[in-house]
Amino acid sequence: DKAYRDMRSVKQSQSIIISGESGAGKTESAKYVLQYLTESYGAHNGQIEDRINKSNPLLEAFGNAKTTRNNNSSRFGKFIEVHFNDKHRVVGGYISHYLLEKSRICVQSKDERNYHIFYRLCAGAPESIRSELRLTSPDSFHYLNRGCTQYFCNNQTEKSISKTRRSQDKNFLDFISKGALRDPQLDDFNDFNECDESMDQMGLTTQDKLNIYSTVAAVLHVGNINFEDDPESTKGGCKITSATEKSLSITAEMLGLDQRDLRNALITRVLMTKTTSSSKGTVIPVPLKVHEAQNARDALAKAIYIRLFDQIVTFVNKSIPFSSSISYIGILDIAGFEYFPVNSFEQFCINYCNEKLQQFFNERILKEEQLLYEKEGLGLKKISYIDNQDCIDLIEAKTTGCFDLLDEESKLPTPRPEHFTTEVHNRNKGHPRLDFPRKSKLRASREIRDDEGFLIQHFAGSVVYSTAQFIEKNNDALHASLLILVQESRNSFIKNLFPKAPEREQSAGKLNFISVGSKFRSQLADLMNKLRSTVSKQIIHSSQY
């Protein structure tokens, strides 16, 4: 309410930052703030206001997942702008999103799940859709069955889920032995209908919805394609196993691709060699080994899902347009500081973001407020705080920062995580915030070798990062052969998810590199500029304790 009053009185936009650790209730708090603003200062039962609120269950279905700490954990950050006209009434909104966790699409920890939409589609989709998309139980999909495959249900909906939607495999007895997961706010069977209704509310057509569901199902079928060594290959290549040929066929059909072309793109990649006599060069097919083909398959699945999520946010933004905004109240709901037994690139980016937010908090709340107190001669006791600029520099500084060193390594002909890690240590010797994993207080972290990770002393505590997958997770690009293939898809929805870019067309035949870290830094810089341009921040610190 104070943010709204300040917006009216000083005639400038406001922002509300909701902070706290994972599971502290940030997302629920954001919902209440959003609901309060739209119901208090919007039209009663207005379409725009309803759509702004209905965007939450839709985005949660595709961007939230069960973790060990939170059954409905947001695995992406969002900044929701509620825009007001000159009469200070709600006229529209805009959502910016940040860093959806990619690795979860392909693999999860034992007691965690993939994104909610996969289970909701399996549990709650009408039989006609389920049959058309060839969906069975979560246990039958490689991208789901290594994590928790139980549904969230209540007693009534558990009985409504047919046996064909549950596990029939004796190797996967999660649902049978443990029963359904219980949570008062989650129910995969009913939540599918809520998600479907949210899409209706956003103005999506029946075909739009089917395109989205089909794309989600295609990701699952991509994951079921498996590979084995090809004894006929003279270069150590691989082939698709006979047992998963059906998955290849289903995937090709759903993505609008030729089955033979998809097969070739998954088991080979192309390299272009340039010669002085020819400007075009020569395209050479390179057979992939089993693990390389699996990586190519996973990269395709991640690329499809990430772009689908982008498209859903675009659908939402198109449904809540505004033309006469004079100011807005922004609500920031982003992942809090994270520390797990194994911390990878996602935790590195999230904690970097929290360092930037902590610095903003220090500057705006502590530094600027105390300068104001001094100016007014209030004589209040000065509050000291630790400036974390040195930690931010360690991560983002040009040439020596972790992000730049990672991009530099990724562009090498043969990038190696050990070399990247060694460079981080060598280029930042003596840095007060950097140390070797063996200096950690945790035994498990001390077992990580010097060239396998590094320790950063953040404002919230020390974190050891395992760098084994940093290079892979920092690259958003597909093999050129896969990228070109989906760009020429017969399925217009899939084709539109992968628009052609001139620079990519010119580099056809090469393995492109698109830095996830650089993209995230750019997005974060835009976010910080938005926060700095707004006035009178309302900081809400949520805690589990």
Image (cartoon, rainbow, N blue to C red):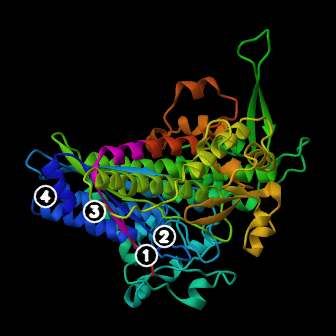
Residue at image point 75% right, 56% down: 468
Q: Quadrant of residue 32?
A: bottom left
Q: Which residues make up the magenta segment?
A: 526-541
Where disc 3 sits, the SS reads helix
Please report whichever mark, 2 or 4, sits nearer to the chain's N-terminal start. 2
Where disc 2 sits, the SS reads loop
Please report whichever mark, 4 or 1, sits nearer to the chain's N-terminal start. 4
- To which residue does mark 1 refer? 543
C-alpha span from label 4 to label 1? 30 Å
Image quadrant containing the C terminus: bottom left
- Amino acid at the residue labelled 3: Lys
**Of residues 512 and 330, the one drawn nearer to the viewer in this rendering:** 330
Please report whichever mark, 3 or 1, sits nearer to the chain's N-terminal start. 3
C-alpha span from label 2 to label 4? 31 Å
The residue carrying pointer 1 sits among few (fewer than 14), some (14 to 19) or many (20 or more) residues within 10 Å by Cα, namely: few
From the viewer's perspective, is 329 left or right of 187? left
Residue at image point 28% right, 45% down: 318
**Of residues 501 and 282, the one drawn nearer to the viewer in this rendering:** 501
- Amino acid at the residue labelled 4: Gly
